[in-house]
Image (cartoon, grey):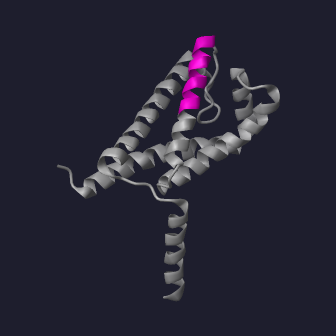
Amino acid sequence: MLSITWKSFSYSAVRMGLALAFLTAGAIKIQNPMTFAATVDAFGILPGFLVLPAAFVLPVLEILGAVALIFDIRGSLGLITLMLLVFIAVLAWGLHMGLDIDCGCYGPGDPEAEAFSGIRSALRRDLLMLACAAVLYAWRWFLGMRPVSFASKYQSVKTLIWKEECA
C-alpha cells in the first residue's frame, strides 16, 4: 500500500505537470494574440467576428485554469478538462477537413511542423493530457484527494501573510 506522502506527491506531480503545460501554452499565446487569431481563423470553426475575442480570452482562461490547478482550487480541473475536450474536437475537425496548418497550441510553430503531423502530434498530446486529467479525477475519487475552495485558499494565504507581518 502506498503511503499518504507518496499519494500526495504523485497527485501533485501530475497536477503540476498538467498545470505547467497550460500555463506555458497560455503565456506564449498571450504574448502575440494576433498570430494566434490567425491560427484560430485557419480552422474555420468560428465566425470572423469571434476569432479575435477568442484569441484574447482563450490564453487568459488557460493561464487562470493553470494557476488555479497549481493551487488545487475547486473547478480548475473541470475547466482544464473542458478546454482539452474542446481542443481535441477542434484538432479532430482539422484532421477530418484535411487542414495543413499548425495547431497553434504553443504559439506559432516552425514551417516544417505545420502539416498533418503537427495536428496529429497535438491531438496525441491533448489525449495524453486528458488521460492525466482522468487520473487526477480517479485519485480524487479513490484516494480522497480533495481540491479546496477559492475562499479557503485565499483565507490561508491571507493568514500566512498576516503572521509574517506580525512577526
Q: Please tell me which residue is depicted at 56% across the width and 19% down the height of the picture.
A: 92
- Left or right, 128 with respect to 24, comes to left
Among the 4 quarters of the image, the one containing residue 133: top left
Q: How many numbered marks have been drawn onto this rendered protein structure?
A: 0
Q: Quadrant of residue 128?
A: top left
Residue 3: percent from the left, percent from the top? 21, 55
Estimate the x, y position of residue 47 in percent, counting from the top left.
78, 25
Tell me residue 93's x, y (percent).
60, 18
Q: Is residue 86 magenta?
A: yes
Give the main secondary structure, helix, strand or loop, of the magenta stretch: helix
Magenta span: 85-97
Q: Could you tell me which residue is drawn at 33 percent across and 52 percent down?
A: 144
- The spot of residue 23 in percent (x, y) is 56, 47
Compared to residue 91, the image places residue 136 above or below, namely below
Q: Is residue 46 magenta?
A: no
Question: Farthest residue in the right direction?
Answer: 49
Above or below residue 61? Residue 99 is above
At horizontal 52% and vertical 88% (from top left) the residue drawn is 166
Q: Is residue 149 left or right of residue 138?
A: right
Q: Residue furthest left?
A: 1
107 shown above or below 14: above
Q: Is residue 98 visible?
A: no
Seen from the viewer's position, the closer of residues 55 and 131 is 131
Residue drawn at 42 percent across, 48 percent down: 15
For residue 156, side relative to residue 138 (left or right): right
Q: Which quadrant of the figure has residue 95?
A: top right
Front one among 92 and 29: 92
The answer to whether residue 93 is seen in the rendering is yes
Vertical placement of 28 versus 73: above or below? above
In-front residue for pair 135/27: 135
